[in-house]
Amino acid sequence: MPAVLPAQAERPIETSSTHVARHAAILSGQLRSLRSAMFPPSSVKSLRSFTSGEVARVLGVSDGYLRQLSLDGLGPKPVLSSGGRRSYSLAQINDLRTYLARARPKEALHFQPGRRSGDKLQVLAVANFKGGSAKTTTSLYLTQYLALHGFRVLAIDLDPQASLSAMFGYQPEFEIGENETLYGAIRYDASRRSMRDVIRATYFDGVSLVPGNLELMEFEHDTPRAIADGKARGSQMFFRRVAAAIEEVADEFDVVVIDCPPQLGYLTLGALNAATAMVVTIHPQMVDVASMSQFLLMTADLMSVIEDAGGHIDHDFLRYVVTRHDPNDVPEAQIVALLRGLFVNDVLRATAWKSTAIANAGLTKQSLYELDRGSVGRAAYDRALESIDAVNAEIVDLVKRVWGR
């Protein structure tokens, strides 16, 4: 007669939702542990200092000129290394801009290129609903480039995945609380906050951030109900709410960069209505180009719906930026040529190259602007940064053109 085994406690059946939730909790806990190891709780992400040569290039002056200013005791005092090398923080670079604008008034607009009286706030929506098009990377590098060149920048993370927020040092699932995203400033109920309440300072001088997290999805769920209940009419219509929130702080910034979510939902439509310009990222692969075709068709249809509802979408410029581009890849070169043939000047001349330097920097949630050249290989660093800077310089030139410069 077979032995009778003791009864085993029945294991509860795990549903798909609890299975996924358990994995999410495991991963979140691991990420928290890794963050604690890399950045202790008492630490705050900080930005490196910049060599005098880097500062000279950014300001458009000679390194010798900066050295003479330092010797004469003019402008901010740089930090001197044991070898006599001078370095400046980004805050000191901005102090240098202020000093040079006063000392050389004919070049003041060069050193301090931000808005003047009568200049319209520029709101740049970086969009594409195809994953892998480097939308967040483009938003990050554009934001930081603008700040390095003397602009006051507000970065808005509208993507519930919150990758841009993570790059600025925030872990969205446990450092961004309830009502601390843009949702807090555009929601329909009495818990709505002012835009100023959801803006955070960052370690990158000149950049402020409205962080994101999964809470942003609430706007996608709330809007149909608000429309049905009559709470989204007139000035309160869903597509006007992002613009209204930005308007609250418009005088405090020169440029707003919005990292749009990877879908054409209510948040993206609000961003496109608020935008003065669109930057569409495109990876030069045929499947991505086909996806962009669908994106453009849907965007055009939805923009028409907004305009029919009383919205006014009139972008100062629309530009396509080729990202993750391998200039030595023949099929990619053919696709880039196709895009230029179709859209002519609406495709930026410069392309953002595919680079292990950019990828390696991203592994530590940093950009190349934050790393020393030697940390990812000097040659790779220089090539990658040259391509990124060329893309961003074109966009800045377009902004200046809108301002009549």
Image (tube, helix red, strand yellow):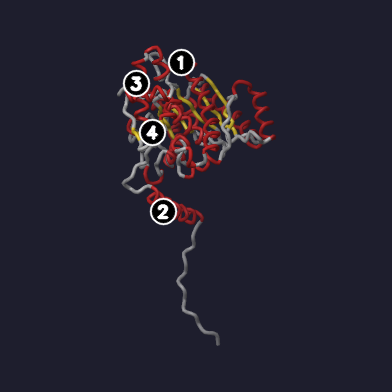
Name the disc covering residue 403, or none.
1
Find residue 172 and report its horizontal and vertical position in percent. 41, 43
Q: Which numbered mark, 1 or 4, is in the foreground of this view?
A: 4
Q: Is residue 23 above or below residue 185?
A: below
Find residue 360 and report its horizontal and vertical position in percent. 51, 43
Query: Where is mark 4, residue-wise?
Result: 85
Q: For the point 51% across and 55% down, which residue is it? A: 16
The CA span between labels 1 and 4 is: 38 Å
Q: Is residue 250 left or right of residue 313?
A: left
Q: Dot 4, crowdedness within 10 Å: few (<14), some or many (≥20)?
A: few
Amino acid carrying mark 3 in the image: Thr
Q: Is residue 239 left or right of residue 350?
A: left
Of residues 188 and 20, the one drawn nearer to the viewer in this rendering: 20
Name the disc covering residue 29, or none.
2
Of residues 226 and 296, the one drawn nearer to the viewer in this rendering: 296
* Element on which disc 1 rests: loop
The CA span between labels 1 and 3 is: 21 Å
Q: Which numbered mark, 2 or 1, is in the foreground of this view?
A: 1
Looking at the image, can residue 151 be seen?
yes
Find residue 350 and report its horizontal and vertical position in percent. 58, 27
Find residue 83 and report its horizontal and vertical position in percent. 38, 36
The answer to which of marks 4 and 2 sits earlier in the sequence is 2
Q: Which numbered mark, 2 or 3, is in the foreground of this view?
A: 3
Of residues 5 and 321, the one drawn nearer to the viewer in this rendering: 321
Query: Where is mark 3, residue-wise?
Result: 98
